Amino acid sequence: MHPSRTGVVLPARPFSKPFGVVAGAVLTIVAHTNGATINAPSSALVDVASAIAQASDGDTVVVPAGTADWTSVLTITKGITLLGATTVTNAGTQNPTVNDLTIIKDDSPLNTTQSGLIQARLNPSQSFRLSGFTFTHGSRTTANDVGVVHLTSGTASSPIFSMRVDHCHFDHIDGRNIQTDGWVYGVGDHNYLVAQGNGQTFYINCANYSGKLLGHGAWADFPWFGTNKFFFIEDNTIVGNGQYSTSGAIDGEYGARYVVRHNDFTNAKYGWHGTEGDNRGTRAVEAYNNSSHWTTVTPSTMNRSGTSLQHDNTWGGTSSTDNSITHIMIYREMGAVSTTSTYSSSDGTSAWDVNDTEGNGTSVQGHSPFLFDSGTSTSTALVGNNGTFTDSSKHWTPNQWVGYSVKQTNPSAASYNKASYIISNTADTITYYVYTSGDRGPTLLFNSGDSYAIHRVLTAIDQGGRGKGDLISGSGSSAVNTVTGVPGWPHQALEPAFSWNNVFTPTNTAWRFLSPMPTEIEGRDYYNLGAGFAANSTPSQVSSTYIASLNGVAYTGTYIYPHPLVSNVPAPPTNLRVAGP
C-alpha cells in the first residue's frame, strides 16, 4: 500500500480482503475511518477506472507506481481522493525535487469531449483531491485547448468549494495543464509545472457562476477580495520555456476569479483575458508573495479586464523595460476584436460602453454618440504598431484627438467597422495604434479613399477597475441588460486596482501598473502605492476603498494561508461563503 500523504490518513497495518477481479488483477478495499481505501492494480486507464467504479464519496483510490499511456479522458463524478506515488518536495521554490513514479502520458484526442486525462465533474456536496501524479506528453505534438486536469461543476446552481490538485508534476504538457470550469473554487498547490510550447499551466473560468452562462453571473456580483470565493494557485513552481511570452502563463476569462500567491515563476507570468468576444473577461484577481525570475523575455503581462490587488511580489533577472508589474489593456479599444463580437470595438459608439454623447466629455442616457469629425483618407502608412493616414482637407490643432477613437467607415474596406485609439495628430495626419498579430481579423488600415469617423469612449464595459453591474444575459444580437431590457451599459461599480510593495530586487525599484488606454486613468481606475509598506500589510487606501458595500465583506487582508484544504483547518465563518448575486 502507498504510504500516507498529507491530508490522507491510511492505517499502518490495514485489514484487506479481495473485492473483485478487474483486468486480470485483484482490487483491494481497505476499511478506513474517513472512507475506504481502494488500490488500483496498475496505472493503466482501465484499472484506475475500475477502481473508481468501486469507490463511493469519501473514499481514496490509490494508484501505484508505473507508466501508462492514456488515450481518452477519465471522468470522475465521485467525491474521492485519487492518490498516486509521485512525490514533489520544495514546490514554490526554484529548486523543487520530483520523484516521478506514477506517470500518465497524454495521448488523448485533440479538442474533443475525450480530450485531457482527468476530469472531475462534481456537485456542491462533494470534494475532490488529486495528488501524487506525473502528467507528461505522449506522441501527439499539437497543443490541446482542454486541461489535462479539468475541474468542473456538475451543476450550475451553487459553487463547489472543495477541489484540490497538489504535489503533481506536469512535465512539458503542450496545452493547458490545470483547468477549472463551471463554478469551481479550491486550490492547486505544491505542484511543479514545466511548460511546453505555448502551454498554459493554469486556465481559470467561472462560466456558470450563479447559473448564468458566459461569466455574466460573476460580473453581477461583488469581487469578494479576502474570501474563499476564488480558485487559489499557491506554492507552485512554474517554469516557461523562454520561447513564447505566454509559455507557462496563468490565464483566465468567463468571469474568472483566482488568487495567485507564494509561487515561484521562471520565464512565466500570470495574466488574463478581457471581454473581447461573446464571453466576459476575468472578474477579479489577487496576486501576492510571488517570486519571478526572467532570463530571456521581457516580464510584462496584460490584465485585460476587471480588478486586482497585487502586492509583495518580487522580480529578478531581466528587468521590465518600463518598471511595470503589468499593463492594463482593453483589447476592444485597440481594434483587436472582431466587429461581429457581442460588444464590438470600444470606439465611442458601442451601446455597451459609456460614450461621449455631448461633445464635452459627458454622456447622457438615450443620446446618440457625438460625431467629432469625419472625412476621407488621402494617403496611409503602417510602421510597426503605428498606423497613420492623412486627410489633406483638414486643419486640426496638433494632438487635439489624442485618446479619441478613429473608425473605418468604408463598407468596401477589409477592416470596415474596426477602430482604435488615436496616439497623436498633426494638422492633417492621424497616428493610431494598430493591432498586428493577425488573430483578430483584418488589420485596421485607411487606404486612400477610405472614409473615417472620430468618436470618444469614456468607459468601456468590464475595463480594468470596473466590476459589479447589472446582470447581462445572452450573447450576440440576443445579449441584453436584464435591468433595462435592452443592450446597454451595465452601470458597473468603480473597483480600482491597487499595486503596492511590488519590487524588482536587483535595483530595489518599485514596479507598478501602466496603461496606454485612454479610458484607464491612474488615480481613478488604478493606483500605484509604491513600496515601503510593512510586508503583507493592507494600506489604508485599500481597506477604505473595499468596504463591505463594494466588496461584499470589508476587506482587511488576504484569505487564510495556507488554504484550509491544504492545512486541514476549519474554513472561516460561513458568511464568507455566500453563493452568488
Image: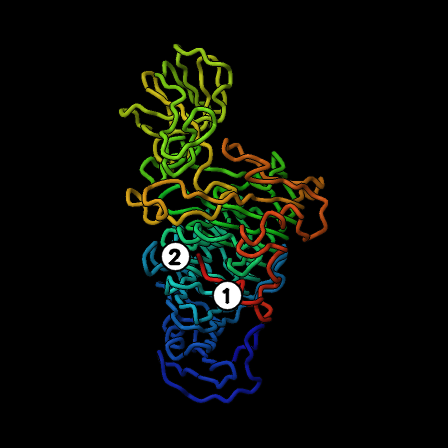
Above or below for 397 versus 437: above
Secondary structure under the numbered disc 1 in the rendered image: strand
Badge 1 amino acid: Arg
Q: Is residue 245 among what the camera can see?
A: no
Name the residue at 39% across, 10% down: 393
Q: How many C-alpha atoms fall within 10 Å of the one at disc 1: few (<14), some, or many (≥20)?
A: many
Expressed as whole percent of the image width and height from the top left, the position of residue 355 reads: 42, 32
What residue is shown with label 2? 208
Expressed as whole percent of the image width and height from the top left, the position of residue 287 reads: 58, 51
Using the image as rendered, state which of residue 467 and residue 11 is in the foreground: 467
Quadrant the C terminus occupies:
bottom left
Expressed as whole percent of the image width and height from the top left, the position of residue 580 reads: 45, 58
Name the residue at 41% across, 62% down: 152
Name the residue at 53% across, 87% down: 14
**Disc 1 to disc 2, C-alpha distance:** 19 Å
Does residue 449 appear to the left or right of 309 in the view shown?
A: left
Q: How many C-alpha atoms fall within 10 Å of the one at disc 2: few (<14), some, or many (≥20)?
A: many
Using the image as rendered, state which of residue 316 and residue 351 is in the foreground: 351
Badge 2 amino acid: Asn
Please name the colour scheme applied to the rendered image.
Answer: rainbow
Q: Earlier in the sequence, mark 1 or mark 2?
A: 1
Q: Which mark is residue 301?
A: none
Expressed as whole percent of the image width and height from the top left, the position of residue 176 reads: 44, 54
- Quadrant of the image occupied by residue 456: top left
- Quadrant of the image occupied by residue 236: bottom right
Secondary structure under the numbered disc 2 in the rendered image: loop
What residue is shown with label 1? 164
- Mark in front: 1 vs 2: 2
Q: Is residue 474 among what the camera can see?
A: yes
